[in-house]
Amino acid sequence: MIRIALAKGRVSDSVLEILKGKGIEFGDEKDDRKLILHEPEGKYELILVKPQDTPTYVEQGVAECGIVGRDIVMEQDSDVYQLFSLEAAKCKLCLAGKPGGRLERYSNIKIATKYTSSAEAFLEQKGVGFELIKLNGSVELAPILGMSDAIIDIVETGNTLRANGLEIWEDICEIQCVFIANKAALKTRHKELSELISCLYEGKV
Ligand code: PRP
């Protein structure tokens, strides 16, 4: 049995659909409080975990593999293999703020974000002075309340920005889901993992 750690939320919704399309179904997925889902053939078990914790379950080896947004993997320095991207839960990392704003107007900019590593790399590459304010959610509030000049956050539909009177200033990068694997398991459970990988892999890296 291969245990797959799946990031709860936007990733799990679309990955469960992909798995279903590949003939891998979990009968108990309708019960949204269940954290462990079983596939009737007993080949796979899914554990539904917080996105930020997904690499940890895989690194620790309690799950042989996992599926999580690349935004999370970019923020963490987990010792896992990132094998390939999946066409699921596509979104982008953006710099956003009040309408009409631009990064070039600032010599020193205050940015609120959940993604401090990615934000730091982007702002350093832009050569602008910056101060980061780490938040864990509802980041859009920061520029509205004057706590920051802008945010760096993921945008999927754009609805959250629109609903809060903000707009994208600049796209930073595209973000997809990534299939990650425990390093030891890729050797010791190679046959079973290969079967799952070839089922999910669509030629996109
Ligand atoms: C993410 C992100 C935005 C929103 C973007 O938040 O931080 O707030 O989704 O999606 P949209 O473009 O489709 O509106 P999430 O839903 O993870 O909640 P959070 O703010 O609590 O982190």
Image (cartoon, grey):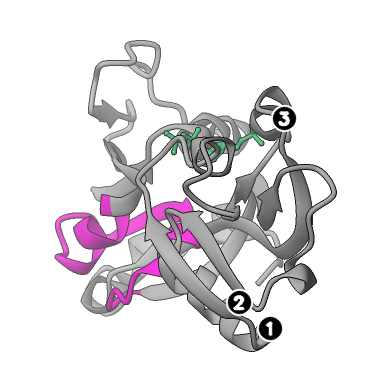
Q: Quadrant of the C terminus?
A: bottom right
Q: Residue at coordinates 66% horizontally, 78% vertically from top-left? A: 107
Q: Residue at coordinates 64% horizontally, 29% vertically from top-left? A: 160
Decide which of tag 3 and tag 2 comes sooner along the chain.
2
Q: Name the residue carrying label 3.
A: 165
Residue 132 drawn at (x, y percent): 43, 66
Of the residues shown, which amino acid type is indicated by label 3? Answer: Gly
Density class for disc 3 (Cα within 10 Å; few <14, some 14-19, many ≥20) is few
Q: CA distance from mark 2 to mark 1?
A: 6 Å
Say whether residue 83 is magenta.
Answer: no
The answer to whether residue 106 is left or right of residue 100 is: left
Q: Name the residue carrying label 2.
A: 122
- The answer to which image quadrant residue 46 occupies is top left
Tag 2's secondary structure? helix
Magenta span of residues: 53-80
**Of residues 6 and 126, which is closer to you in this image?**
126
Tell me: is circle 1 under 8 Å from ligand 1.
no
Residue 87 drawn at (x, y percent): 68, 50
Of the residues shown, which amino acid type is indicated by label 1? Answer: Lys
Say whether residue 65 is magenta.
Answer: yes
Residue 99 drawn at (x, y percent): 80, 43
Q: Name the residue carrying label 1.
A: 126
Density class for disc 2 (Cα within 10 Å; few <14, some 14-19, many ≥20) is some
Quick check: marks 2 and 1 in contact, CB under 8 Å?
yes
Is residue 195 visible in the rendered structure shown here? Answer: no
Rendering quadrant holding ligand 1: top right
**Of residues 168 and 198, which is closer to you in this image?**
168
- The answer to which image quadrant residue 182 occupies is bottom left
